[in-house]
Image: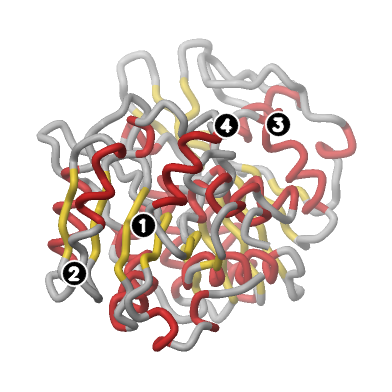
Amino acid sequence: MKYITDIAPEELQGKRVLLRTSLNLPIAADGSVEDIFRLTRGLPTIEFLVQAGARVIIVGYLGRKGDSMKPVADALMLQAPHIPMHFFGTPYAMAPDQIALLKNGECLILESTRREEGEENNDPAFIQQLASFADIFVGDAFAEAHRDYASNVGVAKLLPHYAGILMREEIEQLNRALIPVSPSLMILGGAKFETKEPLIRKLLDVYDNFLIAGALANDIFKAHGFAVGKSLVSEMVPEESVLNHEHLLIPKDITVEGINKQARVTTPIDVHDTDIIADIGPDTVAMLAPIIENAKSILWNGPTGIYEQGYTHYTTAIAELISKSTARAVIGGGDTVATIEKSGAPIGNNIFLSTGGGAMLEFLIKGTLPGIQALE
């Protein structure tokens, strides 16, 4: 794979560069951007191209319904006031006129690619249109690299292509996480056991300690014969080889929400029919504390509780323990990272926060992604 930083800056001067970066950010009810984590992680590539004197055309998508990119463009310009940026909020057919006005070291942010019919089905006509905008393509959107779309896969086939700074860092960090140094710990939260099962099978033997939390733990509890009340469970039943694996850890205690919306900490053997398992408990955090303290490698994806309902306390507690450890940690999943950022837990050089949620999990399972293969 070729990286954009391998090119001498003078070779980029005046070149039109189509930069595919992660612009799919959470938007609040008032239309403002709620979390700029992915935006800031993509800035080094933008700054590198601008400083080299390239003419940068920035593309990405926002939401699933063709939402306008304007709030994200505004947030990006606010984060990088030193970079000349413009937003062009009309159809791509009209983009060439705006691109022609770009000067060296300037950026043009285009509308959401999902507003164009050819994006999601990798349409050859849309791919050709995108390729006509630039001389070089740079793929830096790891968070969407699992999508086989025109803007991150198709266009790479028609232009000289390079991986961006963030893409390179994500690949290197996750490849390292696949070969952990013992003693090691993996924490996997979230839901849908059937989609996580390949990863669990792959890494249960690799990581010395493997905690299954979140709604995934409900499936483990149910398979062991414990009541789970009204908690979210998967259709797939974990197999005995997983349930009885020597590396598997399950929560020692849990936080449940009763019919009156009151939460209480209890054990898996004391869940009522009307309860919803919402998080782990303090004894589980205490169980993890010495494991985290002694670990040399930690991999974590997915919060331990129902993030949307405010159950973030124990996710934060684990983050604080990791922040005090010397382990090399890789942490991903949008809700996990958002919780850590809001907690204020210090992020040292030993901790890498991945921009990928689904992309991170798929990379760990397959070792590559469509958006990465396109750059190779």
- The residue that mark 2 highlights is 80
Which quadrant holds residue 63? top left
- The residue that mark 1 highlights is 38
Q: Earlier in the sequence, mark 2 or mark 1?
A: 1
- The residue that mark 3 highlights is 220
Q: Earlier in the sequence, mark 3 or mark 4?
A: 4
Cα–Cα gap, marks 2 and 1: 14 Å
Foreground: 214 or 73? 73
Q: Earlier in the sequence, mark 1 or mark 4?
A: 1
User: Nearer the observer, disc 1 or disc 4?
Assistant: 1
Does residue 34 appear left or right of residue 198 in this picture? left
Contact? badges 3 and 2 (CB < 8 Å): no
Cα–Cα gap, marks 3 and 2: 46 Å
Check disc 3 and give the amino acid type.
Ile
Q: Earlier in the sequence, mark 1 or mark 3?
A: 1
Crowding at dot 2, Cα within 10 Å, few <14 / some 14-19 / many 20+, comes out as some
Q: How many marks?
A: 4
Cα–Cα gap, marks 1 and 4: 23 Å
Which quadrant holds residue 116? top left
Task: Assign a secondary structure to mark 2.
Answer: loop
Crowding at dot 4, Cα within 10 Å, few <14 / some 14-19 / many 20+, comes out as many
